[in-house]
Amino acid sequence: MDSYGRIAALKIETAQDRAHAVIEEVQRVENRVYASPGSRNLLSFVSDAAVKIDVLLENEKALTQTGLLTVSQIETRLHRITKLIPLLHWMLGFVEGSEVHRSPAQLIPTLRRYAQSILPDSEIVVRSKPELNYSIQDIAKPLAELFKGTPLETSCSKLPDRLFMMSIPGVESGHILIHAVLSHELGHALYNKKEIAKELLPKIGFNENLVKGLVKMMFENQEKQGNPTPELRIRKQVTQEITGRVHGWIKELCSDAIGIRLFGPALFFAAAHLLTSLRPLDKSSETHPPLRLRTKLMIRMLKELYTVERWHDELQAFVRLWDEVSGEPIFSTNPYDQIALETVNDAALDLISAASDTATASLSCYTSSQFTRDIKVLAPLLLSYIPPGEVGPYGQCGTAEKLASIINSGWHVYLCDFETFKQNLHPNDARTRFSAATKLHELVLKALEISGIQVAWEEASRDSKRRKG
Amino acid sequence: MILSAEKVRNLLAHPPENPVDRLVISPLLDIDKQLKPGTASVDIRLGQRFHIPLRAKLSQLDLLSETHQADLLKYKDDTFVPIGDYFVLHPGQFVLGETLEWVHLPKDLTAFVVGKSTWGRDGLIIATAIGVHPNFSGILTLEISNVGEIPIYLYPGLCIAQLFLASVEQIPESVAPVPSAFLVQTSPRTRNVEIEDRDVVDLFRKKLKPS
């Protein structure tokens, strides 16, 4: 016990060093300017938790010295505390990349306000990550569950009810039009919040005959090889694989459908430009359906919600092209994918669309008339190099344009009037398609900045009046 | 002729149908404070971005150097200071700032920016006179320098300069405007083109060279 006593003391000492390192790191990074208050929430949580860990370890030190506990008891007690330290590191990682100069600072106040309008009591942290991927993750609940019953349970009160970590590709940080993909990520948040899976999944059943056929084929193949797995086990495995796929795919598709309702055609345009350029059309995974299926759903919804036939010729041609491509059969050699594809058929897509309607029923969705108006009013401003954060008369409150309107007008210019946009730019800015597109992105970002400042100003003025009143 | 605040207010309140013909100063958060009756200028606010040359990496600034543009791009630090936060400008420090407002001038208006004397008295100099040509569209870059002896806190969102607008005599329709190098400028930056009049200096340089 004597030698273990020294080991235990060493353990405590080094664990305390780890806790101090976390506290020091928080002090180092908390001076940075973050685009969203969510980052500060997290830092405050981590700092509070690290201080508590240090105090708890100090208490353990005294206890181990009394000699009342067995080795196993000390080990268990120490592990209960020290296992929390890696979690704090993990949480600090969430803050990295959310500083104002690394995430699009013009977008975040507007996006945050928008997210809070559809997900009340939520907070977002948007961070740039060095990977070409968009994602969303609510970490408040998992953290509360993780820390439940631990000495850090009370620290969770420092976090909002829902804390969404949204990540965007760092390299694409300034390419605002592509960020319309974030509406899909917000779709995920709504899918979970509204518990759509509970309602929707029981309505989508897969073809039993196809499953039976696959099980039979797999069993026969294995029998030929002389090493058969019991048919029942194969059936269980096949059912799990297919169910997992169908559930994952439906979640993704439903998030697309919600995204289309929230952001309108901009999501489709962004998905068509970003996602399809990175992956083969028919490539699927256990969690993600093939892009061809995703575009099929999005086009169905665009036709359902918008007057596509009255859109600009270029847009109509763009949609027609994708409509043709997404109408083609999806090629897959994976038998699980094939059954999942049979399952997520047209009827299922209709159910998904209807479920997205229910999920967004009480929210302010982007409508066809808004799109028509935005093209008529906002797009010409962009073509005249005026950021459409407001349309005038200028100098009056309440004229701020909405996030989805600004992004959709940007996409319209990009897809229909890009040559006109490019035409009057300085030759240096118009020398390549990319450099001219960067100018368009910058204009759209400036529009978001103007809109965000206008709204913040109105809110602040109202608050000030209320306080004076 | 310089436009009165009333005239500017009228132009902003009644934007013409065609966006190109509009005078845009956006966002104008408090029109009553920024366009005071009886004056002849619009107060403009400090924006959120600053462009700071990294002195530790930049040995010299030579406008005629072939690497001038590349040097400036390489050795710069862009800082975003959100409204509510501040930026400390130390004595002798020079930074490029921006106006919060986007300014779009129609073909018959020109403008010039003058620092506010309130700031000037504290040692803050905001360029001397930035001319803004007709058809310009963008944020205005402010050349900010602290010539005093005490550090100055700069708060984005505060009115820092004033914009005087003047009418321009009718430009014939046949004249196509040459796009400015600073058109659609969305953040403070140095020029993105080579010095246009370097030919003159180059010619004289050749003469100075011994044959």
Image: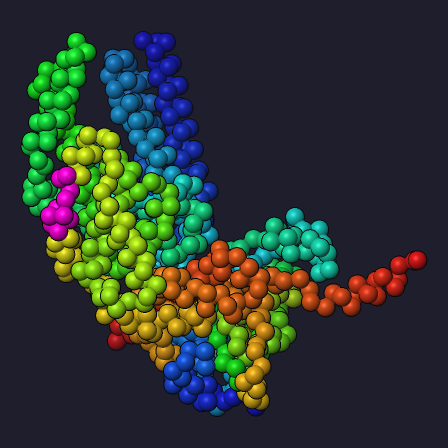
Residue at point 23% right, 53% down?
A: A298
In this rendering, is residue A384 above or below A129? below
- Looking at the image, which is closer to me, B37 or B207? B207
Outermost residue, right side: B211
Is residue A209 within the magenta segment? no
Can residue A194 be seen in this snapshot? no
Position of residue B102 relative to residue A289, above or below, is below
User: Residue at coordinates 40% horizontally, 29% vertically from top-left?
Assistant: A18
**Residue drawn 71% across and 60% down?**
B63
The C terminus of chain B - image quarter: bottom right
Q: Nearer the viewer, residue A160 or A207?
A: A207
Q: Position of residue A263 (x, y in %)?
A: 27, 59
- Position of A421 compared to A92: left or right? right
Residue A283 location (% of width, % of height): 29, 38
Q: Position of residue A429 (x, y in %)?
A: 54, 62
Q: Which residues are magenta?
A: A342-351
The chief SS type of the magenta part is helix
Left or right: B118 as drawn, with respect to A440: right
Residue A246: percent from the left, percent from the top?
Answer: 16, 38
Q: How many marks?
A: 0
Residue situated in front as seen by the camera: B121 or A60:
B121
Residue A350 among magenta residues: yes
